[in-house]
Amino acid sequence: MVSVKCLGGKRKRKWYAYCSYVCGINSWQLRKVIDDHNCSRDFNVKLMASKWLSERMEKTVRENPNMKVMDIRDKVSRKWNVGISRNMAFRARTIAKDNVEGSFKEQFRRIYDYGHELLRKNPGPKLKIKVENSNGELIFNRFYACLKACKDSYMCCRPIIGLDGCFLKGKYEGELLTAIGRNGNEKILPIAYAVVDVENKDSWTWFLELLIEDLGGEVVCATCTFISDQQKGLLLAIQDLLPEVEQRYCVRHLCSNFRKKYP
């Protein structure tokens, strides 16, 4: 048997329906109904859960991964005539994206797969993956890559190395460190890149030590000119590793910093 009743309102006599299953005819029979209902409609349904909604939103998220939370709320309102909160829409979108693309945590766990794929597709690169042990679980810390084709190409470029870093936006933040060169046609050539937890002297020292080793050691890199934007800890790292090397500042960043102070 199944009974349904209205939980809203303050009246003693509320809407109620009762039905039971009739085995002989394999059907349900309505036995009792109190058809007295004057409660206003509530568009917030407690049975609506973010997990249930994420399963219905997977196809939409797959077609439009950058779908906004407000668009999800509008879609739910039009399709099911139900109102949901921003938090529920955000959670549903997150679960759906995890099911479609994989979770951020799972992607970091596959960093070794990414490294092996680079080695398989580009024989001869240098890869460094640094992890930390936290209560028996390996936590990603740093990653360095210098592809062989880029390293060999730099040997034909001008003795100039540009160093820069930028923020990584997402669930797990970090810093992307890069080293680039310039060829004879004034085209930019990526040399190496690294993902680190924070930009400071220690991370730049770790990155530069690997870069110097890849490019032939201190003897070769000492003849190069390094161009940067005075990144945090970078100047100190260069002075420790290559104290006599030429250093220059990027003119565009220098102009931007000057205009910030003297508009």
Image (tube, rainbow, N blue to C red):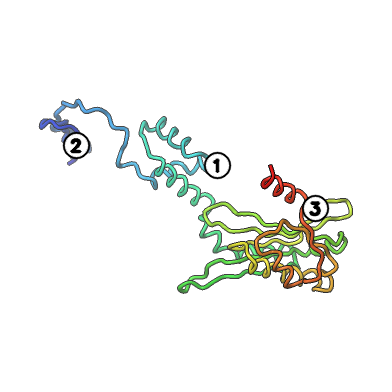
Secondary structure of residue under mark 3? strand
Crowding around mark 2 (Cα neighbors within 10 Å: few <14, some 14 to 19, many 20+) is few
Q: Quadrant of the N terminus?
A: top left
Residue ID for mark 3 = 188
Secondary structure of residue under mark 1? loop
Label whose residue precedes the other's in the sequence (2 or 3): 2
Give me the residue at 46% from left, 45% from top: 93
The answer to whether residue 57 is above or below residue 37 is: below
Q: Position of residue 140 (x, y in %)?
A: 56, 66
Give me the residue at 54% from left, 43% from top: 62
Crowding around mark 3 (Cα neighbors within 10 Å: few <14, some 14 to 19, many 20+) is few
Label 1 is placed on what type of residue?
Answer: Asn
Is the Cβ of the residue at disc 1 closer than 8 Å to that at disc 3? no
Label whose residue precedes the other's in the sequence (2 or 1): 2
Image-quadrant location for residue 5: top left
Q: Nearer the viewer, residue 148 or 56?
A: 148
Q: Nearer the viewer, residue 193 or 11?
A: 193
- The CA distance from mark 2 to mark 1 is 39 Å
Label 2 is placed on what type of residue?
Answer: Leu
- Residue 205 shown left or right of residue 46 in the figure: right
Q: Position of residue 263 (x, y in %)?
A: 68, 42
Image-quadrant location for residue 173: bottom right
Residue ID for mark 2 = 7
Label 3 is placed on what type of residue?
Answer: Ile
Secondary structure of residue under mark 2? loop
Is the Cβ of the residue at disc 2 closer than 8 Å to that at disc 1? no
Residue ID for mark 1 = 66
Q: Position of residue 116 (x, y in %)?
A: 65, 66
The answer to whether residue 262 is above or below residue 249 is: above
